[in-house]
Image (spheres, rainbow, N blue to C red):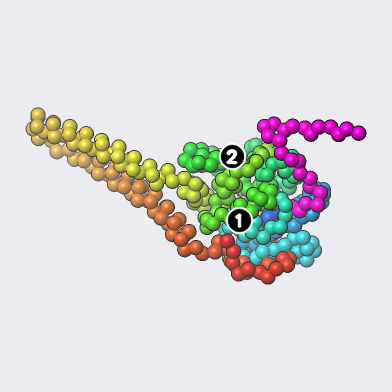
Amino acid sequence: MVSAPPAVQAPFSVPARARAGKRLSIVAPCFNEQEVLDLFFARIEEELAKLGLDYEIVCVNDGSRDHTLAVLLAHHQRNPRIKVINLARNFGKETALSAGLDVTTGDMVVPIDVDLQDPPELIGQFVEAWEAGADVAYGVRVDRRADTPLKRFTAQGFYRAFNRLSDVDLPYNAGDFRLMDKRVVEVLRKLPERNRFMKGLFAWVGFRQEAIPYARPERAAGTSSWRYWKLWNFALDGITSFSTAPIRVWSYVGLIAGVLAVGVAGLLVLRTLLFGRDVPGYPSLMVVILMSFGLQMLAIGSLGEYVARIYQEVKGRPLYVVMDRYGFDDAPPFAGG
Ligand code: UDP
Ligand code: MG
């Protein structure tokens, strides 16, 4: 019997992978999520059972102030494939995610929000994309109806600014919800920076990436812990870690201002010589002084944003501190990153 020739995939042909015998790691950062966890585990375990993969669910308790840890441990008792990392305090979602990624053992890794805004049904499609050769399959939100108009507007502005200013392109409306091959996760683990802007890092690593569209539902329970001030700082982190444009632009602003100033000075001298001294130009003087003061403050401020981040990196503190681990074979590390 003659076997059919392998199908050629454009634009490149990659060896097809098979899921048999492979393990999937789910990473779920949890911050004050006691209400939603039961529902989350019910949904995700149902999906995982369909996939025909071995799996583990690594839950990172990010310093929750409610009974999240107790609920997680109850689930760990019930299903030992649910593992729990308890961080020593709230380190923020990005860091909690890193803590989880650092301990995964799967051939594929999927970070997911526990509020069910990342629909677990999509994981099946991610795995199919992985089998077809994608190293990263990421969810893209086709509509942001669940968000307020202000959030949609600011998100749009952020993506536009980020992509204009930095060398890596953030895909619009892609979150952390994705499936990554083991080797992509290896690269992420090796990145030394303390400042974990995961969206940017995910895009920075490259590899064969494939977008999978989905509609993002509303939070199943509880409230989002992201407020606008936090989102603004998140955006600043993103832009400063992936672009040096805001700090470099000041040389050009200064240069243009300097050239203009010389021109204006020349005109003024000429005018004084030709027509003599006229009415003192108080308003124009004030305008120039205030404007240059504003520009200088902006320039110093943008320097500060970078210097502060250099300071963070130079201190070289561990990214996070692990207090306890449940369901892992090896001894708990004191800290990681
Ligand atoms: N989260 C976390 N640490 C934090 C804030 C959030 O681990 O300091 C987790 C949270 O439990 C959830 C995910 O990050 O699983 C997304 O958080 P949220 O739903 O509040 O964000 P949004 O959906 O509004 O982006
Ligand atoms: Mg959410």
Vertical order, 70 against 154 (above or below)? below
Question: Alpha-carbon neighbours of circle 2 within 10 Å: few (<14), some, or many (≥20)?
Answer: some
Place of residue 51 in the rendered image (x, y in percent of width and height, measured from the top left) = 80, 48
User: Identity of the amino acid at label 2?
Assistant: Pro
Q: Which residues are magenta?
A: 1-24
Place of residue 299 in the rendered image (x, y in percent of width and height, measured from the top left) = 35, 47
Q: CA separation, marks 2 and 1? A: 22 Å
- Taking the magenta stretch, the answer to whether it contains residue 14 is yes
* SS assignment for the magenta stretch, majority: loop
Residue 231 vs residue 105, the one in the foreground: 105
Upstream in sequence: badge 2 or badge 1: 2
Q: Within 8 Å: ligand 1 and the Cβ of disc 2?
A: no
Q: Within 8 Å: ligand 1 and the Cβ of disc 1?
A: no
Question: Alpha-carbon neighbours of circle 1 within 10 Å: few (<14), some, or many (≥20)?
Answer: some
Taking the spot 75% from the left edge, 60% from the top edge, the residue there is 82
Q: Badge 2 is on which residue?
A: 171
Residue 5 vs residue 133, the one in the foreground: 5
Place of residue 290 in the rendered image (x, y in percent of width and height, measured from the top left) = 27, 44
Residue 81 vs residue 6, the one in the foreground: 6
Dot 2 falls on a residue whose secondary structure is loop
Dot 1 falls on a residue whose secondary structure is helix
Disc number for residue 189: 1
Disc number for residue 328: none
Corner quadrant of residue 75: bottom right
- Taking the magenta stretch, the answer to whether it contains residue 176 is no
